[in-house]
Image (spheres, rainbow, N blue to C red):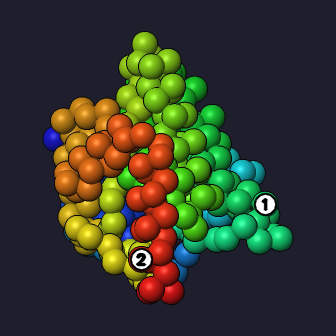
Amino acid sequence: MNNKSVLITGSSRGIGKELALAYGKQGHSIILIARNEKQLIENQKQIIASGGQANYISCDVSKPDDLQAAINEAYSIIDRIDIAILNAGIGESISFTKDYPEKLRYIFEVNFFSAVVAMDILVPKMKEQGGGTIAAVGSLADFGGLPGSAAYSTSKIALSHYLESARIELKQHNIRIITIKPGFVKTDMTARHKYPMPFIMNAAKAAKIIINGIDINKNRIYFPFFPAFVVYIFKLLPGSITDKILGNWKNQSSKYD
């Protein structure tokens, strides 16, 4: 396997960390981007110890100027980025309270606009180098408006539609756009959830599935299979039925609050 340069946002913990470690073990050059500098240093050490190469850039992706500076810094470290995995994201259950718009904007900055800002720099660079791969991590939760998760679900469906459009437009430039939609994965984010999370998997397994999907040129990587299949069927149901199902789901979930 040829050595590639892989940039990963949200790579301090969870899926992002496991992706970085796995690619590092394969001998690739990794650019780690996240806020937690202490954890980035530790991840860098692990990658180097496993035979890979790694550099890190501490950055708050919710701030467009900081993210732009970080990606430009990445290009000052390496000549090209072959694979960019835009993994940074937050999941927060918020209700329609007085400060809801402010929280909504923050979630969108991280879950949606960080990908838009990153691609604004990555796409021209990849056109110049003759191609590349951009993969962004969405969620199976974008199938509809989940009670208590309007901001999260909406940000993820926005990302999904954005990627679908980009895939079609950028194919002619040999730029692959990949949509990644995991179900429940054991991370700091899901550790805060009190409701049941069926088919939850560890982050290392999720990273393996994602890397395999990228390697075999999949446009969409949805997993685990059964939740992804249920979501597909759910989208086919009439709205009157899905409203009842989600209303019942909210009532059941409240037992774990």
| 134 horizontally vs 114: left or right | left
Q: Secondary structure at mark 2?
A: helix
**Which x, y percent locates residue 163?**
49, 34
Q: CA distance from mark 2 to mark 1?
A: 27 Å
Callout 2, which amino acid? Gln
Q: Residue furthest right?
A: 98
Residue, disc 2: 252
Residue for point 45% across, 57% down? 244
Residue for point 54% across, 53% down? 145
Residue for point 47% across, 75% down? 251
Residue for point 54% across, 29% down? 123
Q: Nearer the viewer, residue 5 or 208?
A: 208
Q: In the rendered view, would you say 175 is above or below 221?
A: above
Label 1 packing within 10 angstroms: few (<14), some (14-19), many (20+): few
> Within the image, what quadrant is residue 182 found in?
bottom left
Label 2 packing within 10 angstroms: few (<14), some (14-19), many (20+): few
